Image: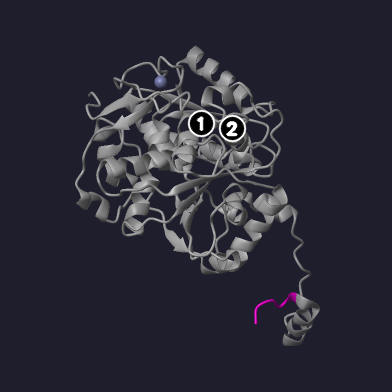
Amino acid sequence: MPLNDFDRYCYACGADAPVDAPLHCNCGNPLSLRAHARPDRALFEQTPASLWHYRALLPIADDANVVTLQEGATPLVTAPRVAAKHGLAEVRLKNEGANPTASFKDRQVAVGISHAKEIGAKTVACVSSGNVAAATAAYAARAGMNAVVFMHAHASEAKAVQAALYGATVVPVDSPAPSAVFDLCIEACDKWGWYHLSSAGIYEPYNVEGAKTIAYELWQQYGGDLPDWIVAPVGGGGLLGGIWRGFLDLKRLGLIEGIPRFAGVQPDGCAVLDRAIRNNETFLESLEMPWPDPATIAGGLADDILFDGHTALPAIRETQGAAPVVSDDEIVAAVRDLASSEGLACEFCSAVTIAALDRIPGVGQGTRVCCIITGNGLKDVPWHARNYTLPEAIPATVAAVEARFQEGEWQRG
Ligand SMILES: [Zn+2]
């Protein structure tokens, strides 16, 4: 069944092409998918049960091919203590950790694997630091497919275990450069006829469509009154570029006039976006300069190139956005601060958004901010467990409890 309501579009030169065109534009940049459907405003006013509420804007032809664990429809929670600490009018957190495998990657993989099913794939493969691996493994199980997940040197052990739990074949690769592992994965897919499910628009335009639905949900959750800034972590840039393209859809449909400004946050140990913005690099120029030695506690952001820079760079530039950078110490502090002040434990990768709140130009009193919390902090429990000493057990007496408090354990009055 053809995808009548889609074509492909180049955000670098403005060219369009048929939906079945080759991946790359004549100008050398990757083409993105672009929806033309015009759902009624009423669709966006309804509370979604999952991201498939926005089915008309997702590139799957036949409902029978939709593979779902009811992903999306995640909470938007207020963070008044974070807002007060940073002197902002409002901070809200889009909690993507509430997805089925506990990260936003479920949105992308659900759409990508549905497309894989549509074209008859039996085995899917991906490159991942962890979250895509877990999502790919879970959705492959759901679809009755095999999954092979290549995990690079910055991958999280806990997420590898999570992927194995869902029955995937986990293949750790001894390389610090994700781009090199991508080359390996693509070669393996070509050799064995696997479907490449990695979350990287330069190789595969279907997955990243899933991230658009975050923008649709935000419009509904904010009652159409969107915040001034969207603050999102950037690894390859697919999340940020995807949300921006979702807002472009809302603008095309007449639901919004302006688009919030975008801040894409990276760790200082892998700051390709910051470099590209400061040096005014084109996407293709940035690809020529992989980050030499990615090193950060936020392993999901250790991408040595911007796999979705063709949408992430224009998202920053066209919204007069920013690309702040934070240190690992600031990331760890932000995780602990958010958990203990708002009751929300997030991944290291997500905490960059909180750590960056003081260094986004123009953000201050009166500013309303939405931080995209990409993954659940329970994924990092092995790290926290190594850095936490459980206090010694006490006898079961009130006197022993009182003694413990007098040692300084009691924090809240
Ligand atoms: Zn082009």
The residue under label 2 is 276
What's the coloring here?
A: one colour
- The answer to whether residue 139 is left or right of residue 306 is left
The x, y position of residue 220, in whole percent, is 32, 55
Q: Quadrant of the N terminus?
A: top left
Q: Pick the residue in front: 122 or 19.
A: 19
Amino acid under label 2?
Answer: Ala
The x, y position of residue 196, in whole percent, is 47, 24
User: Which badge, 2 or 1, comes first in the chain's sequence?
Assistant: 2
The x, y position of residue 221, in whole percent, is 35, 58
Residue lying furthest top: 191
Residue at figure coordinates x 59%, y 61% from the top left: 338
The x, y position of residue 407, in whole percent, is 80, 78
Residue at figure coordinates x 30%, y 44% from the top left: 251
Q: Is residue 43 magenta?
A: no
Amino acid under label 1?
Answer: Gly
Looking at the rendered structure, which numbered label has been put on residue 167? Answer: none
The answer, for residue 100, to whether it is visible in the render is: no
The residue under label 1 is 309
- The answer to whether residue 399 is left or right of residue 47 is right
Q: Is residue 85 above or below residue 363?
A: below
Q: Quadrant of the C terminus?
A: bottom right
Q: Is residue 201 above or below residue 260?
A: above
**CB of mark 2 within 8 Å of CB of mark 1?**
yes
Q: Secondary structure at mark 1?
A: helix
Among the 4 quarters of the image, the one containing residue 233? top right
Q: Is residue 52 above or below residue 62?
A: below
Residue lying furthest bottom: 399
Disc 1 residue crowd, few under 14, some 14–19, many 20+, Cα 10 Å: many
Locate ligand 1 by image quadrant. Answer: top left
The answer, for residue 264, to whether it is visible in the render is: yes
In magenta, the rendered stretch is 409-413
